[in-house]
């Protein structure tokens, strides 16, 4: 019987490297094609965004609790690790036959296409990126596998007849000429992938958007807000400044890649249950009467004592004026807003049309155009409501409709209506700090947007409540700082705070999670006086 030679197996290290390079090439070229067609169709980002959409709410809350505003970076890093392991597995599964690897690449390709199709803002042109990525990944896998197999076969043929397969495989990987061929091939693919990835990133980096933003210069409203009075914060005592710098303003959203649209490209459609459909450009918006208003925004994901609350002087056009021009029908219940990346939110009509509310289509923030990550060119800002249902960034569509239509977070178990809860936070001393015994300054911030803070009380070690000093008020849609001086003996101490708003409602002691409509509870800090 004729001897059937055993199939040549390429080395494990080379096989894993082939898988990694195949995946890298696919993602890099996919990112480049997406930059040239539809940026949101980049397979890597599409898979990440789809993972965010499909993740159960407890997992999302855990990610925010663990990583804060770096949750998206953590997701990207985690995805990279998982994809690297899967890619190495593809290579190792193809040591003797490329069919296994090719099948796995095809599976990844289908998943990439499905992830892109799942993105609400991606049309037919968005399929180019995942399809090309699949073809490139498969092509690189076949090319590198053939190169490595050919070299391994040649080395095996040169092996002494008495050597076993393992020894032959080892000898095959040691030949200088064979190593050079494999090295040149892998380096070529790695270099090409790097160039494609960097070019794609350069094209999608938003330089055009930055130029559009810079061209607007400073933003001056027709109606300026009253000057912020002296004594509006106790920053020297450890509170935040009253106005949060743009670079420090909290950011929590679903965008894995910040949407980028120029002011010249931006348009806003107002339609649905209206008498007259409107289609506005950025120039149309700026030509209207613009106002400036200090507004404190709070994220519904903010835990008790959390950092996701900030204040800025927003500049824009009152939404109620735009809606009045469109003519809202009496049976309309919500304004269903949509971002350029497909995110949606539902805001009660009566809130946005309230003449005492000043909800804005904002394009300015602290005298400058909105930062890109905060919604440039235009976003919604609604005093008194958590942002998930009222502060759509990169907004491009307002549809007047009923509550039958559910927005992004409502389909994930969050409340339909969510006024911001009265809360207070202790900023100093920080948790587990060590401070000198004797006179200790305790200071923090409180908020009760669209009602206003009336009083903040502090108590130590479960004792009597004492009223803290409040900073100068600005308006009922902004936070207030507070502070008090305590005489404390050496030892550990626990300080608690609670706020009361102008309606007489006192912050609830009961601890509740952020889901479905915001956290409640007294904030407490333990520290040591010594």
Image (tube, rainbow, N blue to C red):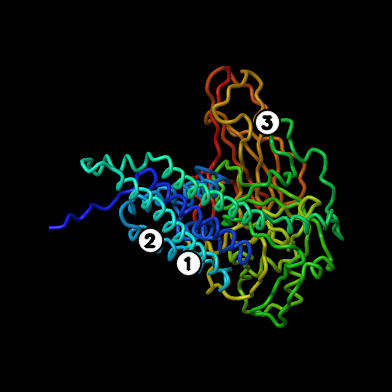
Q: Quadrant of residue 418?
A: bottom right
Check the image and report above or below for 271 versus 451: below
The residue where tag 2 is placed is 102
Residue with the most extreme left position: 1
Residue in the picture at 58% in, 57% down = 255
Label 3 vs label 2: CA separation? 68 Å
Residue 428 visible in image:
yes
Asked whether, in this view, residue 132 is left or right of residue 163, the answer is right
Residue in the picture at 61% in, 49% down = 422
- Mark 1 or mark 3: name the one nearer the start of the chain: 1
- Characterize the local packing of mark 3: few (<14), some (14-19) or many (20 or more) Cα atoms within 10 angstroms: some
Q: Quadrant of residue 45?
A: bottom right
Across and down, in percent, residue 155 comes to 34, 45
- Using the image as rendered, state which of residue 504 and residue 83 is in the foreground: 83
Residue in the picture at 63% in, 58% down = 385
Asked whether, in this view, residue 182 is left or right of residue 400, the answer is left
Q: Which part of the image, by quadrant, shows the C terminus?
A: top right
Across and down, in percent, residue 401 comes to 60, 76
- Using the image as rendered, state which of residue 13 and residue 80 is in the foreground: 13
- Using the image as rendered, state which of residue 12 and residue 414 is in the foreground: 12
The residue where tag 3 is placed is 484
Residue in the picture at 53% in, 50% down = 188
The residue where tag 1 is placed is 113
Residue 360 visible in image:
no
- Characterize the local packing of mark 1: few (<14), some (14-19) or many (20 or more) Cα atoms within 10 angstroms: many
Check the image and report above or below for 496 versus 134: above
- Mark 3 or mark 2: name the one nearer the start of the chain: 2
């Amino acid at each position: 019987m004729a001897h059937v030679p055993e199939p040549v197996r390429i080395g494990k290290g080379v096989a894993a490297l082939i898988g990694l390079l195949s995946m890298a090439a696919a993602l890099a070229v996919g990112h480049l094609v997406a930059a040239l067609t539809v940026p949101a169709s980049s397979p890597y980002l599409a898979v990440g965004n789809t993972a965010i959409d499909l993740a159960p709410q407890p997992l999302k809350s855990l990610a925010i609790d663990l990583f804060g505003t770096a949750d998206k970076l953590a997701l990207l890093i985690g995805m990279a690790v998982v994809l690297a392991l899967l890619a190495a597995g593809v290579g190792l599964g193809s040591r003797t036959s490329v069919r296994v690897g090719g099948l796995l690449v095809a599976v990844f390709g289908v998943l990439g296409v499905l992830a892109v199709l799942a993105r609400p803002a991606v049309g037919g042109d968005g399929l180019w990126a995942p399809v090309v990525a699949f073809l490139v990944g498969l092509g690189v896998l076949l090319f590198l596998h053939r190169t490595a197999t050919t070299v391994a076969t040649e080395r095996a043929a040169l092996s002494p007849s008495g050597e076993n397969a393992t020894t032959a495989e080892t000898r095959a990987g040691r030949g200088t000429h064979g190593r050079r061929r494999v090295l040149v091939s892998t380096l070529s693919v790695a270099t090409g992938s790097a160039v494609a990835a960097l070019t794609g990133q350069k094209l999608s980096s938003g330089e055009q958007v930055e130029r559009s933003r810079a061209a607007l210069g400073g933003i001056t409203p027709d109606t300026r807000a009253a000057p912020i009075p002296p004594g509006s914060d106790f920053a020297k005592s450890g509170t935040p400044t009253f106005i949060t710098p743009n670079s420090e303003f909290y950011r929590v959203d679903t965008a894995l890649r910040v949407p980028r649209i120029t002011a010249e490209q931006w348009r806003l459609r107002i339609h649905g249950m209206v008498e007259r459909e409107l289609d506005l450009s950025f120039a149309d918006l700026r030509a209207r009467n613009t106002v400036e208003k200090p507004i404190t925004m709070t994220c519904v994901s903010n835990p008790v004592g959390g950092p996701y609350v900030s204040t800025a002087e927003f500049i824009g056009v009152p939404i109620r004026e735009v809606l009045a021009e469109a003519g809202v029908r009496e049976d309309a219940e919500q304004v269903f807003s949509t971002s350029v990346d497909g995110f949606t939110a539902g805001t009660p009509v009566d809130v946005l049309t309230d003449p005492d509310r000043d909800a804005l289509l904002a394009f300015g923030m602290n005298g400058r155009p909105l930062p890109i990550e905060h919604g440039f060119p235009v976003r919604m800002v609604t005093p008194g409501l958590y942002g998930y249902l009222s502060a759509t960034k990169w907004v491009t569509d307002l549809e007047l409709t009923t509550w039958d239509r559910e927005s992004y977070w409502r389909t994930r178990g969050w409340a339909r209506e969510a006024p911001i809860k009265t809360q207070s936070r202790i900023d100093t001393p920080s948790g587990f700090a060590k401070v000198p015994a004797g006179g200790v300054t305790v200071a923090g911030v409180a908020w009760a947007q669209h009602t206003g803070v009336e009083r903040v009380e502090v108590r130590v070690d479960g004792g009597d409540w004492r009223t803290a000093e409040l900073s100068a008020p600005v308006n009922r849609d902004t936070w207030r700082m507070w502070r008090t001086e305590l005489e404390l003996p050496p030892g550990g101490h626990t300080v608690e705070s609670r706020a009361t708003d102008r309606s007489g409602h006192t912050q609830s002691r009961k601890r509740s999670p952020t889901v479905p409509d915001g956290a409640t509870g007294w904030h407490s800090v333990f520290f040591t006086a010594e």
